[in-house]
Amino acid sequence: MADELGEFERIARFLAPLAGPGGLGLADDAALVDCKAGCRLVVTADAIVAGVHYLPEDPPELIARKLLRVNLSDLAAMGARPLHYLLTTALPAELGVEWFGRFAQGLEEDQRGFGIELLGGDSVRTSGPAVLSLTAIGEVAAGMEIRRSGARAGDLVWVSGTIGDALLGLQVLRGAYRDLAAERSDYLIRRFQLPDPRVELGQLLSGVARAMIDVSDGLLADLCHICATSNVAAVIELDKLPLSSAAGEVIGREPELRPHLAAAGDDYELLFTAPVEAAEAVAALSARLRLPIARIGRIEPGAGVRLVDADGRTIQIDHTGYRHF
């Protein structure tokens, strides 16, 4: 569909209604942001590319929501409350007004759900695939942010939700597992297209977790970041990795796939370490949020991450997660 609106008409029609007070109606060169006394701003940016992070034929409203949610997951990993975001779009000409309108509707839906407001951004044309970039801004009480560098030997390793669903969902979209029941296929697809950023859990883990990261590139790869920054090692028990019933059915047929789910990306669950004595607090949060939080391993002295079987033997896999370069 041909583009029927210019840049500024698009902004006025679709994006200005999404702007919060600091966005000044998207009518100025920049936004104004206040920071509460005793708080720090937490800022993150992520981009998604058609054909890499989502399928070009995915519904535009779901693409918008995924773009927002992957950034909210980064805020959650620091224990921050979402406040604002900036949006930059580089779109090919064939994505016209109808596509952009549906994209804006997706943003509006999740803005309401997560209490976040648009501040501004930029829009450009590209001859290549669509590139969508979002910068999210949150706040956290000074000194209560959760960083990757706090893990200590003796900590337990925990992860929220389930692991591997997004990888399997992408494979379903590409034609795999055609004999899965429709409700299982739909569940896996949704986990790929619309992740659940654990925003509330992230805030509640302040003062409980010592180190935290969200699972974007793969559980093992992301845990490697914590270990490298904290100067420790980790051991992950394969049979402790939490699986959804849909993923469990796939693994029941192809058990050799299970170790690869530990390296699968796009789960956007929270992966964190906490001292042994925090186990009761973690269990209480799990019950309060009605969200499974599984203990999957431990932190040790040394370096690197090992995946082990039920007998403690190291499992070798070809890669530990997604690499952009």
Image (cartoon, helix red, strand yellow):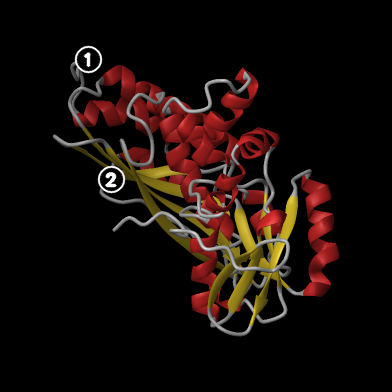
Q: Considering the numbered disc 2 on the image, is that residue within a helix, a strand or a loop?
A: loop
User: Closer to us: mark 1 or mark 2?
Assistant: 1
**Quadrant in which the N terminus is drawn:** top left
Query: Considering only vertical position in the picture, is 104 above or below 320?
Result: above
Near-viewer residue (307 or 133): 307
Label 1 close to label 2 by CB (< 8 Å): no
**Which numbered dot is residue 28?**
2
Q: Amino acid at mark 2?
A: Asp
Residue at image coords 36%, 51%: 31
Give residue 1's mark: 1
The local crowd at label 1, few if under 14, some if 14 to 19, many if 20 or more residues have their Cα within 10 Å, is few
Q: Residue at x 26, y 36 (%)?
A: 130
Residue visible at 35% across and 27% down?
14
Q: Amino acid at mark 1?
A: Met
Residue 139 % position (x, y):
55, 60
Query: Which x, y percent locates residue 128?
Result: 17, 36
The reply to whether residue 32 is visible in this rendering is no
- Given residues 46 and 86, the one toward you in this image is 46
Is residue 185 toward the left or the right of residue 137 in the image? right
Q: How many marks overall?
A: 2
**Label of residue 59 in the image:** none
**Residue 189, x across and y down, in percent:** 53, 30
Q: Nearer the viewer, residue 212 or 300?
A: 300
Where residue 282 sits, quadrant-wise, is: bottom right
